[in-house]
Image (spheres, grey):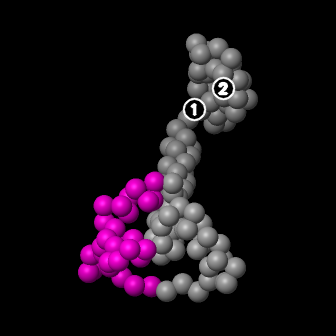
Amino acid sequence: MNNLPALLEPAAKRCCPGSTPTPIRPSAMATTSLKLSDELKQRAASAAEELGVSPHAFMVEAIRSATDKAEQRGAFVAQAQAARDDMLRGSSGVDKAAAHDYLRRRIADKTATPPEPTSWQK
């Protein structure tokens, strides 16, 4: 969020000295309201002031960041599930202990050889 002021600068317009920069918004933006505790609202306002942005811009960035993280986590979980499904359809894999041993050796010796997959089905 440290780059937030720089992102807002080009769009910021001041109507008079001392006013808060407000990004120019496209007319197609939706409006929503948030109910915040007084304590959280004050914390957000203080953090926004420290960053030099409006509380609104701070909250928009926080929601965007949380949304990005949730989407990334969802993609990671989907990728892990797909890898698990592929492994279950296959007939071989790398033993957990062998994988851990390889990773330890890899940290110590960049030329460590990965373990060979073995049959896990009985």
| Quadrant of the rendering where the C terminus is positioned | top right
| Secondary structure under the numbered disc 2 in the rendered image | helix
Q: Residue at x 57, y 32 (%)?
A: 92
Q: Position of residue 101 (x, y in %)?
A: 71, 24
Tell me which label, 1 or 2, sits earlier in the chain: 1
41 is higher (above) or lower (below) than 9: below
Residue 9, magenta (yes or no): yes
Q: Residue at x 41, y 76 (%)?
A: 19
Q: Is residue 108 left or right of residue 64?
A: right
Please give the residue where the numbered disc 1 appears in the rendered image.
92
Q: Which residues are magenta?
A: 3-32
11 is higher (above) or lower (below) than 106: below
Q: Amino acid at mark 1?
A: Ser
Please give the residue where the numbered disc 2 appears in the rendered image.
103
Q: Is residue 62 left or right of residue 23?
A: right
| Secondary structure under the numbered disc 1 in the rendered image | strand
Comparing 90 with 31, the one in front is 31
